[in-house]
Amino acid sequence: MKPLRLLVACVCLCLLALNGYAQSTRLRSANKQFETMSYLNAARGYEDFLRSDKKKDPAETQEALTKLAYSYRLLQDSRNAERVYADLIRDFPDTDSKNYLYYAQALASNGKYRESQKLYSQYGEKQTNDLRGRTFTVSYMDMSKFYQDSASYKVDFLPINSRQADFSPMYYQGGLVFVSGREESGIIKRIFQWNQTPFFDLYFQPDTTELVRIVDPVRTSALGGGNTTADAAKEPKPLPLSRTEVFSRTLNTKYHEGPVTFFKDQSKLIFTRNNTSKGKNGKSSEGVRKLKLFIAENDNGSWRNAEELPFCSNEYSTGHPALSPDDTKLYFVSDMPGGYGGTDIYVVEYNNGQWGTPVNMGKEINTEGNEMFPFVDPNGHLYFASDGHEGLGGLDIFFAELHEGVAYKGVKNLGAPINSEKDDFGLITDKNRKSGYFSSNRKQGIYDDDIYRFSRVCKQMDVLVFDAKTQKPISLADVRTLRNGVNQDLRLTSAEGRTTFCLAGNTEYEFRAIKEGYSPNTVRFSTLTQSQNPVMSVSIYLEKTENTLVKGTVKTEVNQRPAEGVQVILRNEKDKSEQSVTTGPDGKYEFEMKPGAPYTITTQKNRYATNKEQLPKMKPGKNPKVIESDQGLYGEGDIFELKNIYYDYGKFFIRPTAARELDRVVSILKKYPAMKIEVRSHTDSRATDTFNLRLSENRARAAVDYMVSRGIEPARLTAQGLGETELVNGCEDGVKCAERDHQLNRRTEFKVLAVK
């Protein structure tokens, strides 16, 4: 996986330039392998040169050590890289400062954090502009922050893995598409000279339920003088591979195919591939085949028409694609000019088949190191791998909560056990990070990169609710969890006043108990520190009150589904005090109202019309215990069918029943004075296309004119005639249909264009 992980299949030749002196035969041979990026053979050649008894020129020795260490680095052999960098820096302390950085990284990858800290400190003294020296020096003073969540997740090795590299899984049709260098069938074997392994192709595991747990597979020995584990000499046992298949024979080529991402309807995909253009145009000016992104479409189960994305280039690499949940943004990795370090994460807009200009994600995400393997979860937040942000060693996986494209809370290292001292990358997960998959070359794997599954382990929290005066348990009380002011789970207490939650580590919680006839009460609890108790508990005491509970559900008007992420504000208009909460997945909210004061309730969310309602004034001693007040939201782009607006065949006059339905739209527009709508009219398929288009325009104009006559400003209304272009049934030209079926197509809708 090496060139895909590093993204750039070229070496820093300025760092490793040849000296102008006559070289020994062994060194010349090793250099030839190095220059052609055959790093496995180069490492063998340099080891042979350094072991020779012949007295060596110090310059030749320094060159051989530098290139040997760098070869091991590119081969991800951190044990041997550490060994050779130690010799290089001991014998040639004036070596390039980058070698101090690489030595520090090799030590961290081998779990030697104290030694790594010293080397990072020396690197920081030599390269004051590179923040990694100072950051990692401080970070490795206290490693506990990387293990705060270690008891919250279980990690399993999977039988999807082969004897070669397997990495970068992606969800697809209930299974996983992933990258693999597993052995090909047939006589001809294609070998990648970088590390003498097969080229990578895309494979498909159709059923994730087949991925049962495999424990303690054995790793093989590394090249040269170091071993990856104490039992490295043992021969690994063959694993019972789960059912896998080649994902697409039309996409897989004789070169590398890499990580893939799918559009949400899975009709198209974007994937990484070596530049496969024929002739000289397929390589950069340095003679290297870079990586590019391609888009392909699903044609009855076969992926065809692979086309290069317009911002790719022969002179730099682009790869590791990740689409946003709404398919409007593509995140990817590139070493294009103008970045912060080795490889950076970029984002580009995608709209109606057109690509915008890539934008660097900025210094909150990107560092002087390598950022790669992005993934965007269903919430629109970003996961990625980096060796530039402080971590446990190698590539670690990080999380960034995005707000309007900005990581406004910075980035968070996911910590152990998802991260390790080795390379961890290519994570995919659900919206709450309860389970998912990632790739790693940690020592539990086989030979190279492997795919692992992670799942959150429940840390049980019992919440007990009692009457504050009688100390008796309260049954059927609502207990709500909140995080950062956002509603989460809602549970009911049992007859014993108990309910149970599963907590995540490294998180601060609020538990709020609510029961009619009682004042709500809240307790806070933190899992920032680990508890050894298998079950934790908190108690909440409620006092009786004459106040009223107001509760309800916020729903979108277009489909009557619970609306998440809506800010709900209850305002006491007498003393101007406010209570506020943000709805969770259930769209619900709960507040307490005092008697003797008028209250208003406001719901607001970006791209939705703000709704404000007056609540009835409560009188002391005569209050209902609970008021149910559901709220509705109109959002930009929502389309509503006006059920009772039908027209006589070939006419556009407003029927009396249609007038009543339009009056309802008028009342909505008066309630939301900033709302603008488009009135959309449709016809049936009878008559010519031209006639129907003109007729639908007249019908839409008639509806608009009616609403203008009821006091709506014309600037807030747009008329759109669509003719017979969007029939709701099969009553097309030449199809016999009953009149009632044709009438269903003679309809009017309104679409919300703007809410403010």
Image (cartoon, helix red, strand yellow):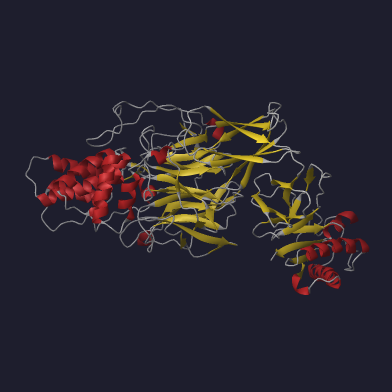
Q: Is residue 131 left or right of residue 576?
A: left
**Looking at the figure, which quarter contains the C terminus?**
bottom right
Residue 710 seen in this snapshot: yes
**The one of 90 and 735 positioned closer to us in this rendering:** 90
**Front position in the image: 180 or 571:** 571
Which image quarter is the N terminus in?
A: top left
> In the picture shown, does residue 704 fall above or below 657?
below
Residue 669 percent location from the top left of the image = 78, 65
Q: Image quadrant of residue 463?
A: top right
Coordinates of residue 146 in the picture (x, y in percent): 41, 40
Estimate the x, y position of residue 497 in percent, counting from the top left.
68, 29
The reply, left or right, for residue 693 in relation to residue 107 is: right
Q: Which of these two is toward me, 559 or 249?
A: 559
Q: Residue at x 68, y 59 (%)?
A: 608
Q: Quadrant of residue 610?
A: bottom right
Could you tell me residue 301's position as x and y percent?
Answer: 59, 46
Q: Does the rendering let one see residue 157?
A: no
Task: Choose top left, top right, bottom left or bottom right for residue 660.
Answer: bottom right
Q: In the current view of this chain or complex, which residue is farthest to the right?
A: 656
Note whether 96 is above or below 538 in the view shown.
below
Q: How many marks?
A: 0
Position of 308 with respect to 300 (left or right) is left
